[in-house]
Image (tube, coloured by chain):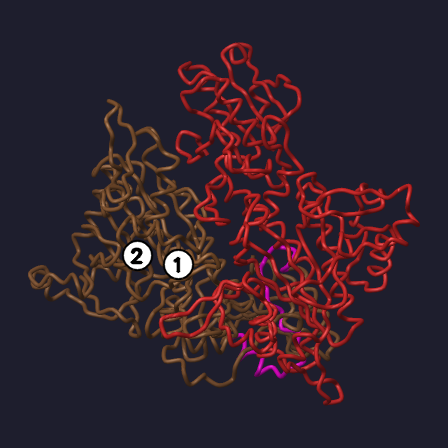
Chain colours: A brown, B red
Amino acid sequence: MRLSRYFLPVLKETPGDAQVVSHQLMLRAGMIRQTAAGIYAWLPLGKRVLAKIENIVREEQDRAGAIEVLMPTIQSADLWRQSGRYDAYGPKMLRITDRHDREMLFSPTAEELFTQIFQNGAKSYRDLPRNIYQIQWKFRDEVRPRFGVLRGREFLMKDAYSFDVDYAGACHSYNRMFIAYLRTFARMGIHAIPMRADTGPIGGDLSHEFIVLAPTGESDVFYHENWEKGRDTAHVDADDAGALEAFIDGLNADYAATDEKRDMAAEAACAPSLKQSKGIEVGQVFYFGEKYTKAMGVTVQGPDGAAITPHMGSYGIGVSRLVGAIIEACHDKDGIVWPEAVAPFKVALINLRVDDAACKAAAETLYAELTAKGVEVLYDDRDERGGAKFATADLIGLPWQLVIGPKGVADGVAELKRRGGDRIEVPLAEAAARLV
Amino acid sequence: MRLSRYFLPVLKETPGDAQVVSHQLMLRAGMIRQTAAGIYAWLPLGKRVLAKIENIVREEQDRAGAIEVLMPTIQSADLWRQSGRYDAYGPKMLRITDRHDREMLFSPTAEELFTQIFQNGAKSYRDLPRNIYQIQWKFRDEVRPRFGVLRGREFLMKDAYSFDVDYAGACHSYNRMFIAYLRTFARMGIHAIPMRADTGPIGGDLSHEFIVLAPTGESDVFYHENWEKGRDTAHVDADDAGALEAFIDGLNADYAATDEKRDMAAEAACAPSLKQSKGIEVGQVFYFGEKYTKAMGVTVQGPDGAAITPHMGSYGIGVSRLVGAIIEACHDKDGIVWPEAVAPFKVALINLRVDDAACKAAAETLYAELTAKGVEVLYDDRDERGGAKFATADLIGLPWQLVIGPKGVADGVAELKRRGGDRIEVPLAEAAARLV
């Protein structure tokens, strides 16, 4: 992409109303603009990051055997009355009346609708287990939306719902999502710690929040220092229920809990290794058994002909929130430092002298080579000073900067720099190949 | 994907409330379920088709130089008051009041918000031309939603907005989208005819609707029979404004108009070649000049320092509607006949005898081979009769059926059938390679 034809409205000043660094940097880097309280437009750079995160989430859900669907955002109030949540959900639910005076709402989550859809399609125990998910916009009418996309009102969420014949099956489904979440966040270059958590308005007996540590987080969290190490999940076979459970039990032997689920005895037991921090929740998993299936009268026929009420779990990832959470974890004084897997482009190709024929020729050649090799490159071909170009590249945080200037071109070299790292000289003829 | 682990709730009976064949087939093939009037849940098979169509639209928009963003679904009423459309839009707009009694709405289109976002980011004539697009859910509160996804209330739309310094530039932007639309629909295996059309609530001077001919269409359309031929667009260079205009003028020399834009003199002139049909609108392009930029006070600085009011166009494609429109154009008495580019899977792999060890081994081998080659295959490994498996494969309309039975396996062959075509025998060892 040529920057001269792109839409990247960066800001020189930090907007005064943005309190946390991710919100400030997303505004300054031209990723988002607020269009109403807690509601954001995603500009081109922000949309690219959002799509990268969405794709990683999708790939790991598919790999875990979950099946993608897509529910409407606008749902009928009647459906929520069946579960009792229409009245219970409170003012965070955006309630709507249509032209025929029917009561509707903008989905804040979708347990009821997934349960209904599942009931409509599954008849027999042979239709279980199933895990069905969507990546769809949700709305929660927060009284004080803040921190940009970290606590917005309209937000993109992956929500999955599992249906099993019994508790043991539901535990395996829970564990499958548990390890899928570890893999998902690790692929994005961040470390999210699973912590025992309160179940809140979803309900149920068991829940973990996946928390990214960050001083700007809203949650107080407590954990054994072992959690600061990464965990290797590559060897775990998620189809083997026993091995998977043993692996996860092994992880959870190290204490980690959110404020609402603190266990003082457990904290005392790991005292010298106990850490306290602030954190940002990027995902949450729930086991809630028959809460919704019973309320909505869902059954399937068992092998003996008797009715079985499926056990359910639900599993959320805050896709748009992750954009902010990753920035909270990955930035420096000059701007964002994207992990490569979620970077909007891999390379900033910077031509320091667009009025110099040799520089222009070298930059155009590299742009063509990189594009042909499928490398995502943002080519700064604008008529601007070098200092402004470096500042933009640092601010938007692309992993690599490839710099073309008159002295280098005369010597047949470009400068290659890892974001935040040192510059090295590379021969022009080898530069593109170094970035594949 | 193994059908035994998928979620494909096909219906044997045609639902009585579905009037048009695409609605009937989408329900029967387990692609969608209605969740409220004019609102649908997309089940796994439907979601796959929707994603294929969305990807083709995205690739052709990107190729045409449009830049992707994503706007929120919920917008402020104030923004629509600036353009005068808040009152003018009427009861199709879903109006919402949030917890702080602010007037909001679910976006039925997004001229205002794109104009505001553009104004916020573009300062100079050098920031033009730009074409910015999104693929996002919209809501229009139709008084009588019908025909399934062809006229639903919540629908997925690609909407693009171009900004140019003058009329000539805006015409080039219009023509770029015009040819991008021809390419987009051709890639989906359908033939959409551009027709002079009324501009409706968007406004402006010039508009074309892209219409798929179908007896179940809602629009009456009139066109020269030349339009029934496909048009080769491969040689057209969309960057060459003159050549592009000449190509499109050449096309438009053949008369084509919707009911509202009939020209009786032109029809008389092409009388023996005039055709009348019903059609389904799948896209519409508009040039409306300064309508929104003037109302919202948008300017950029010209080369001489004077303010320029940008000329705009907007360009819609009905992404979810296309699923229905393609089925209207591509089906037979047994079910859907997907064009390969939008088929949910390429191959139905049918094992006729899951209880036969040799059949199972052959089918599993082919499933592994096809999956390894990246071929999208739906493997019918269910314990069902062959007749039921063929009926499902025909109904869901995958382009190829690869059939494994005991006699064939004994002879070392599978049967390969194009959907709706003849069966041929292929050696088991060659079957996967034939389908790459």
Residue A296, disc: none
Please, which chain is the residue tagged with disc 2 on? A
* Crowd rating for badge 2 (residues with CA inside 10 Å; few <14, some 14–19, many 20+): some
Residue corresponding to mark 1: A105
* Crowd rating for badge 1 (residues with CA inside 10 Å; few <14, some 14–19, many 20+): many
Tell me residue A127's x, y (percent): 35, 31
Q: Nearer the viewer, residue B390 or A90?
A: A90
Q: Is residue B121 left or right of residue B168?
A: left
From where the camera sits, is residue B402 visible? Answer: yes
**Quadrant into which the C terminus of chain B falls:** top right
Q: Is residue A320 left or right of residue B164?
A: left
Residue ID at (52%, 18%): B404
Residue type at mark 2? Tyr
Please, which chain is the residue tagged with disc 1 on? A
From where the camera sits, is residue A345 visible? Answer: no
Establish if A307 lies above or below A419: above
Establish if A93 lies above or below A8: above
Residue A86, disc: 2
Residue ID at (75%, 57%): B197
